[in-house]
Amino acid sequence: MSRTVYVNGEYLPEEEARVSVFDRGFLFADGVYEVTSVLDGRLIDFPGHAERLSRSLRELEMESPVTDEQLLDIHRELVRVNGIEEGMVYLQVTRGVADRDFAWGAEGEPTIVLFTQSKPGLADNPKAREGMKVISIADRRWGRRDIKTVQLLYPSMAKMAARKAGADDAWMVEDGFVTEGTSNNAYIVTGGRIVTRHLGEEILHGITRAAVLRVARDLQMEVEERPFTLEEARAADEAFVTSASTFVMPVVEIDGASVGEGRPGPVAARLREVYLDEMRAAAI
Ligand code: PLP
């Protein structure tokens, strides 16, 4: 069955949705995005995603084509018409259409596109019981990773390198320290503490990261926000990642070597459980 998608003010069957070849999102990756999960037909942490979208737009001197209230309505309407119980809503805003020129300023209205992805079993993911395998790879992305732009070619290349190596994902390393996964934030548990890289321009400020660290602190777990090395990660008791679509996902292998006992650990399991409970309760 064809999905209904949203393009510039219209709800359309996906086959009829169109964006110009002159769109700067297409020509320059001049656009930003968000992915919000849906559980029980409701949106997980929508305010966090709306806030980060505003920040990404502001950093790129782009206008939002809609208010937060309109954005929420569009998300809910797409979830409703497409009958999404578990899945995601993808949102992209680009600078819009202009004759090709590196300088911006001549474009018209921003382009806004939203679509849903149905993912039954998103929360009851078997990977959460098995754990993920990651490889390490040099971080060759640009320097403003705190802006959630659609220029995702290097993370795609890193993901493919992981696949070819028989792993699930790649942890990117810069100046000897892990930055993050291809589409998630990275954590280790060592010396009784949860360690994850501090916020800065080197990583995306994960919405799930913020919520999971809040949960960890509420559970009286100790959190250290600082860079960590691969050596530290390999010697850690546990490792895990967080993202809007994987929630809290244990990592059991790094570059072929087991982390801890090579099984998902108790800290990741507890954080996943409490995070999911709290987020379901607050979903809108
Ligand atoms: N880091 C990167 C590079 C990402 O692409 C993502 C999500 O797409 C994340 C971290 C996790 O962010 P969030 O928890 O907001 O999904």
Image (cartoon, rainbow, N blue to C red):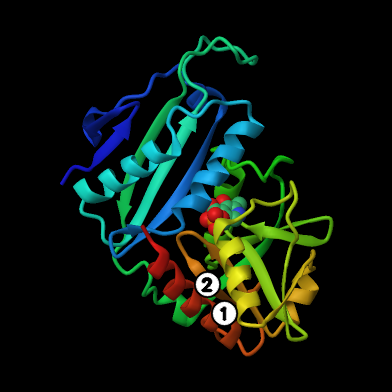
| Residue sitting at the far front | 69
Residue drawn 24% across the image and 33% down it: 11
Residue at mark 1: C-beta within 8 A of ligand 1 = no
> Vertical placement of 145 versus 14: above or below?
below
Where residue 265 sits: x, y (%)? 58, 86
Q: Dividing the image into 4 quarters, which one contains the C terminus?
A: bottom left
Q: Which amino acid does label 2 sit on?
A: Met
Label at residue 5: none
> Vertical placement of 45 versus 97: above or below?
below
Looking at the rendering, which quadrant does residue 72 occupy? top left
How far is mark 1 from mark 2, CA to CA?
A: 7 Å
Residue toward you, 129 or 243 = 243
Residue drawn 79% across the image and 75% down it: 232
- Confirm whether residue 212 shows in the render: yes
- Confirm whether residue 182 shows in the render: no
Please state if 133 lies on the left or on the right of 12 as rendered. Answer: right
Label at residue 249: 2
| Residue sitting at the far right | 175
Looking at the rendering, which quadrant does residue 195 occupy? bottom right
Q: Do the residues labelled 1 and 2 touch (CB within 8 Å)?
A: yes
| Residue sitting at the far bottom | 261
Where residue 190 sits: x, y (%)? 74, 82
Residue drawn 58% across the image and 59% down it: 184
Residue toward you, 255 or 231 = 231
Task: Tell me which label, 1 or 2, sits earlier in the chain.
Answer: 2
Where residue 182 sits: x, y (%)? 59, 55
Instruction: Please give the residue where the numbered disc 1 appears in the rendered image.
Output: 268
- What kind of element bears circle 1? helix
